Amino acid sequence: MLEIFQYGFMRNALAAGVLVSIACGIIGTYVVINRIVFLSGGIAHAAYGGIGLGYFLGINPVIGAIVFSLLAALGMGFVHRRTGQRSDTIIGVMWAIGMALGIIFLDLSPGYKADLMSYLFGSILAVPNSDLLIMLVLNAIIVILVWLFYRELQAISFDETFAFVVNVPVDKLYLMLVCLIGLTVVMTMRIVGLIMVIALLTMPPAIAGLFVKDLKRMMLLASLLSIVFSFSGLLLSFYLNLTSGATIILIAGVAYTISFMVQRMFSRNTLKAGSQAKQE
Amino acid sequence: MNNKQREHAQTVIEMEGVWVALDSQTILEDVHLVVHETDFIGLIGPNGGGKTTLLKTLIGLLQPTAGKIRIMGKSVAEGRCHIGYVPQTVEFDRQFPIRAWEVVQMGLLGCRKPFRPISPEEREVIEHALEQVEMEDLGQRAIGELSVGQRQRVYIARALTSQPQILLLDEPTASVDPQAAGKIYDLLRRINQTVTIVMVSHDMNAVSSYVKSIGCLNRRLHYHGKKEVTQDMMDAIYKCPIDLIAHGLPHRVLSAHDEKGGNHA
């Protein structure tokens, strides 16, 4: 089993797995509790436009994706704050336009473009050292900002009306949060691909949320679960010769389904005890 | 508090000719209201009469289309630092990972700088607020695990944590059982010794027995700083007295029936 660590690409893949898992555990928790999964999907697909632009301009596509995802995040975040209920329509529009832009840019770019699929379905086995460094920096930004604004972010997630009334800068913090989602999306894209960004961002925190009712613990558990899914997915895909990104997602999916059922059974058993306690 | 004392008391809220429209529909019409220190005002009125709108306008959640609002002599954005707001309901996900203690902590956020851990003094303020609403034992519970009444008390504690001079409550006892409601009103009466309270309520029993003065709101506000609902208020807000009688409330709300308890249903 240890022989896989002899391969450089495998060591990079495992390192990428850890870095992405930490970010997804933290940011995914906010995505899940704020119920903005669709918005995150929109950012992820708009980021694809940046990848196309990166190829077109001949720069690192990750840089293009970062720029595009930040712009998309700010745009969608702004729309979400301002228009409220109908924001999902506009997010859907931006989602589609970003995707289309990416493909048009790629059409216009000369040369070899087979790498495209790796952004759609992930290329965790081909993560270069430079991308690892970018991920490390992004991770540091996420951890520091969330650590600094932990209470404020929790407050706007729980009850933004009250947060506004006590003069917490709700709009600015919200835009910061969607930008962090954008950055996380770019990182996750490298490992499991654009199509499945949503899965890593939602499933580990969703599982964690079933079992813990504390925000910090939810983040911690989500990150740990994400690491477990990435590692086991990598090993399985290595030995069974499967696509690594898809394997990771399926493992997470199976884990989610099982924990959902376990939690349902568990809560049914405690339901009686709980209602009795409440009456007292 | 009689009128002479009232004149000496400090003005905490001043609304002058305030109009509020939502989607081009007028909700509040030319509202004038002066609230003095340690007033306890109960606002009644029909559904859609603008009670909640009035509170939301006071804390800047809605912008008036005309008129002036001063809170502690300051603009709404600055003055609302002195206000503790208890909304009617907080829409949230029952799974939301937040403890009652952390909800109460939200009351501190506006007045403190970020980046610092909670100081022992601030911790004490939070503990004290939880004690005031008799929720100190449940502070570590997740908010979704609490009953409606317990949550309502947590929201009151949250409002108290900012150590407000004014407390605005929107239906604090809606969907709370009578026993819990009584506790909440007793608490409000205690708090009212130092804190000014404006409360929107459908609970006429409570309004009649706990507040110091009553205002009727049906687009226009009818408020004279008194506890009686006068004839002109009734005339102006036709639905108001209907409500009163239908609920079989204590006679003393209606000035015409003073002394003799005639209309207990």
Image: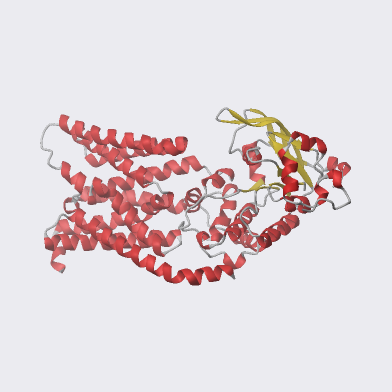
Q: Nearer the viewer, residue B13 or A123?
A: B13
Q: In which quarter of the image is the N terminus of chain A?
A: bottom left
Residue A111 is left or right of residue A151, and the answer is left
Residue A144 is left or right of residue A7, and the answer is right
Q: In which quarter of the image is the C terminus of chain A?
A: bottom right
Counting from the top left corner in percent of width and height, residue A225 is at 31, 62
Kindly tell me whether residue A134 is visible in this rendering.
no
Q: In this view, does B104 lie above or below B2?
A: below
Q: Nearer the viewer, residue A15 or B142?
A: B142
Please name the residue shown 42% across and 67% down the image.
A267
Query: How many labels, in total?
Result: 0
Image-quadrant location for residue B179 = bottom right
Furthest residue in direction front, as rendered? B265
Q: Is residue B200 above or below residue B121?
A: above
Q: Is residue B251 above or below residue A95?
A: below
Image-quadrant location for residue B3 = top right
- Report the colour scheme: secondary structure
Counting from the top left corner in percent of width and height, residue A66 is at 30, 40
Q: Is residue B34 above or below residue A108?
A: below
Counting from the top left corner in percent of width and height, residue A273 is at 50, 72
Residue A116 is left or right of residue B20, and the answer is left
Image-quadrant location for residue A147 = bottom left
Counting from the top left corner in percent of width and height, residue B7 is at 85, 40
Kindly tell me whether residue B246 is visible in this rendering.
yes
Please name the residue shown 71% across and 38% down the image.
B217
